[in-house]
Structures are given as C-alpha cells and as structure tokens.
Image (tube, rainbow, N blue to C red):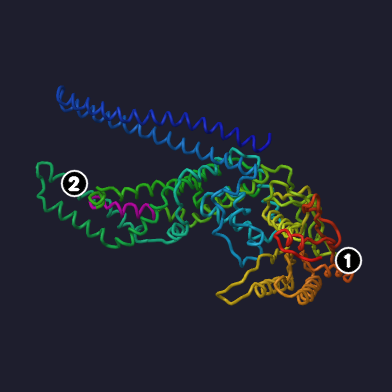
Amino acid sequence: MEPQNVYNRRREAYEKLQARQRQVENRLSNYRLFAVLLGFAASWYLYRKAGPYFGLGAGLVTLILFAYLAFRHNRVRRQRKFAEALGEINHRGSERATGKWAAFPDTGADFQDDDHPYASDLDLFGPASLFQWITSARTPLGRETLARVLREPPGERTEILARQEAVTELSAKLAWRQRFEAEGMVVGGKPEPTEPLLRWAGQLYPAYLQPWVKVGILVLPAITLLAVTFYFYQRLLPWPVPVLLALIQAALLRVGGKERAQVLSTVYRNEARLRTYAHMLARFEQQPFAAPWLRERQGRLRDAAGRSAYQQIRRLSILAERISNRENAMFMIINILILWDYQCMVALEEWKGESGKRLGTWLDVLAEVEALSSLANIRFEHPDWVMPEVAEASGQSGLSARKLGHPLITSGRVANDFDLHAPARITVLTGSNMSGKSTFLRTVGINLVLAYAGAPVCAEAFHCSQMFLWTSMRTKDNLEQSISSFYAEVLRTKRIVDAARSTKPVCFLIDEIFKGTNSHDRHQGAKALIVQLQKEGAFGLISTHDLELGDLERESLGRIKNYHFREFYQDGQIHFDYILRPGVSTTRNALYLIRMIGIEVEE
C-alpha cells in the first residue's frame, strides 16, 4: 500500500477514536458534577435526619466516588490527547508524502550556521529544509541530536552501517514509531531546556544524606504534630509548646531556603517532561529489536543496581509531582509542620545517588532514537530509494550514482547518472542561467549528507567513500566586518583549499566560482583553483559560466571532466530538461532573459 494511503487510513481511524473518547470524557465530566451535587445533598440530608455518622459516611463515599471519576476522566483525557497526537502525526505524514511539508512549524532555524562547511548551502535547516522535511523529534535533545547527525558525519564507516540497519528496522515499525513520537507530543507547551536538569543531576548535596538529618526531619515533625494534637485534644499541652516547635521548624526552613527553593523549582518545572521521558523510555525498553545499534542503546538503560531507566525516571517524575504541592495555598503551613522541603530534598538526593550520573546517558539514548526515527520516515515513504554503499577506507574513493535526484523536490524531479572517481576527480559544470547547475550541486551534497547520516538516498544506486564535505554557494557580504561578497567567497575558498591540503579526503561543491570579479580575473583565478584542488587530490564539482574553463579537461589529460545542462526553445518560450550531459555547454540564454524584461538588446 502507498505510504500516503497508509497515513490517511490511520488518520481517519484516530479521528474516529478521538470522537468516541470525547463523548466518554464529556459523560465522565457530567458524572463528576452529578456525584458532587447529589452526594453532598444526600450527606446533608442524612446528617440532619439519620445523624452525623451517616452524613459523614455519605460524604466520604461521595469523595471516593468523585476521586474515582476524576481519575477515569484524566485517563480518558490523556488517551484522547494521545489519539489527537497520532492523528496529527499521520496527517503530517500524508502532507509529507504529497510534498506539502513546507508548512510544518519546526524548520530547525535555530540550528542555522552560515559558518558551517555545508549546512547553509545545502538547506539543512530553516524554511524548506531537510530538517523540516524529516523531523519527528519532539524533545529538545532529540532535535539537537538530529541536527548533529545531519551536520556531523560519523568518523567510522561501521557507525554508518549500524545506523542504516537501525533505520531500516525502524522504518518497518510504523505504529511503534508513531506512538514513540506521540509520547513526546502530549505534554504540550514550550519544553523546558534540558541543561538545568542535567546540571542538577550532577550536583550533589551530601548534607541531606547525613543520618542525623534523615532521622531529624522525621522525628522533629512527629513531635510537633503530637504536640499540636495534644493541645487541641483537651488541652493536654499548653499552647506555647506546639508554637515553639513550629517556630523552630520555620527557622530550619529558612536555613538554605533560597538554594533549596531553586533546586526544587528546577525539578518541578520538568515534571511534565520527566513523565514524558518515562513513557518514551518504557516504549523503547519494552520493544524487541534486532538491529545491534538499537539493542546496544537498550543495554544502556540501566542504573548501577540494574534498575531500568523507565522505572527510575518515573520515580523522579513522581518526586517532581510531590514538589508541585509547593504551589498549594496551604503549603506554608504543611511545610512548617512536616518540613516538606527537607523531605523532598532527601528523596531527590537519594535518587541522584542511584541514577543522577546516568540521567544524561538515558536522555541521550532517547534523543538518538528520535533522530533515527526521523530518518526512518524517509525509508518508509520512499521504499524505492536505495541505502548507499559506503566504501571501506581501502576502497575506491569518490562517488557514483544512478538516477540521482534531489530529495526535497517532490514534483517534477529529474534524476541523472553521475560518476566522480579517480582519475577524473573534478567536474566543471557549465550551462545557461536556470538550467539546473546549482540544484545539481545541492543534489550531490544533500544526498551525501543523507548517506553519511545512515539514511536512504534519492537514487537507484549510490556508492561513495567517506569524504569531508565543503561548499561555497551562498556567500554574502558582512557590513559589520567590512567584508564584501567577493572577499567572503575568497575566504570561504581558502578554507576549502586548506581542507584539501590536509590528509583527509575532501569533496567540494563550488557554485559560480569567483562570480564577484571581472571576467579576466575570474577565469585566471578559477583555473588556478581547479588545478590546485586537482593536485591536492580533492573531489568536487565547480559550476561556472566561464566556458573557457572547459579547456581544462584536455589540459589535465582527463583528470578534470566537463558536464553541462542546456535549454531549448519552443513556440518562443524557453524550456529546461535538467538532464546532465557530458561536455561544455553550447547554449546561452542571458540576452533572451534580459529581453524578456523589456530591455532592448541588439544582436
């Protein structure tokens, strides 16, 4: 079945489920109201007619019934939100499958970096980007990890192959992936940053774990509560005794109170997110996997005593929920009577002693799974795309592809065969304006990014070696630093040359080389650069309007190859077929385009 049809069927099923759950939710809400009104009316009637014990008993039954209905109501509401999340996920999947994904809200714009070797030029982040197209990461660390996977290729070929196997397995587990993603969606609101929570987990406050402290915060409140009880019960104690004890406990709360409040607030702000982490961990821990990459991550989800990460994070979320009681209007009195802040601090420090050092690892595992689940979207929606073959270090360097297309172009995509191997390491790409040169450079680059990430590529066949990718395509001026666009291009080119001089293999993509200067200097500079990069053993493509650079194929004895795109005219209109052809371009369209805007140009 086509992925779009799968998404649509699942979306319709979840919409029907939502409607049923909303009806149940409304009924339970009405039942709660009736239970309170009728229950307390009955309690009042029994209190007046049958005596206080009957009235109090009926009131107690009413409270128990109300609590049960509230529990059922909250559970159904969460189930409805979960179904809504699943419906949204499938709606988004259908939109992605039909090429309507450019309206997705998460563009990853916060990861844009013009200084990165290739991220900006290849549209990895921002509007209409690779990140926007594939992301299903819902946690802050998940988004960051997906961004890192796209912009930081792994150093080892074995990691790429392991990711490929994991992505393939995850792509077949659509229902699991969607439920895993939905767990991250039901919290809602703006997620809290993870760094404060991780810092808290690594900061120990050993004073709270001293035996005398743990005993003292149990014994002293017990004495105080007994004193209060004895005072109110036939005045067995004079009032100054419980008051004095309460003042002592109030003074204890002031000792380190600000620091303690800050710590408790950090945990409390993450209460909802911790509950989400627990649910996501439970789904990942309990799912059987075959891929070694996934099984190895599951093996990390234990503490020193062998307890599961899910259990420990759930326990922390319950502690965070207890801290939420600090927002209660009666909290000040409760806090003084039982030293609630101290009780919470002791429990949190005990938790940190067991699992604090592993919290970062557990959240990293979740983030990595979110990142690969995002890549699995590609595999599921494009089963005809190929998993690339990544050569061993001793294998043939370069890349070759059959029917290579741009993955972000869903309508009218044109695929081309392409080969870039020694001895022909460099391609000079010529063609008229709008013929497809820049798009083809991005096609090569973005597919290499996907290949190194462990994802399928938009091709029938794809073979590549591990190379460090560099691009120079969208250089622009910087007024603050007094850098012109041409000088910015020169600086970018210098970084590419420096990278090529290293021992690491480099693949470069340069669009319209030295376009910011006169034709003579552009030709001389471009020729010198291509020759130098060829001598350094770099691989790459350079697009240019300078047709004379085509002579380099002959001068280099075939180490530099020429390819081109062309246009054709039909019924007075210009057309492009975007087919890559060998040789130098023989067509031009600049004067035609200039005439199109009303400027008269003589032949």
* x and y, in percent, of residue 70 in the image: 35, 34
Seen from the viewer's position, the closer of residues 556 and 429 is: 429
Q: Residue farthest to the top?
A: 49
What main secondary structure does the magenta stretch of the protein show? helix
Q: Which residues are magenta?
A: 336-349
Q: Nearer the viewer, mark 1 or mark 2?
A: 1
Asked if residue 343 is among those painted magenta in the image, a careful observer would answer yes
Quadrant showing the C terminus = bottom right
Evaluate whether residue 208 shows in this view.
yes
Direction from residue 316 to residue 227 in the image, left or right: left
How would you rate the neighbour count of disc 2 (Cα within 10 Å): few for under 14, some for 14-19, many for 20 or more?
some
Q: Is 1 rendered above or below residue 503?
A: above
Which picture quadrant has residue 477? Answer: bottom right
N-term mark: 1 or 2: 2
- Which secondary structure, mark 1? loop
Q: Position of residue 442 (x, y in %)?
A: 71, 58
Q: Residue at x 56, y 60 (%)?
A: 111
Give the alpha-carbon distance from disc 1 to disc 2, as whole Å.
Answer: 95 Å
The quadrant of the picture occupied by the N terminus is top right
* 551 sits left or right of 269 in the view: right
Nearer-the-camera pick, 558 or 293: 558
Report the residue marked by disc 2.
226
Name the amino acid type tagged 2.
Answer: Leu
User: Does the magenta run of residues contain 162?
Assistant: no
In terms of secondary structure, where does tag 2 sit?
helix
> In the rendered view, does 10 fall on the left or right side of 528?
left
**In this view of the protein, which residue sits in the foreground, 288 or 21?**
21
The residue labelled by disc 1 is 558
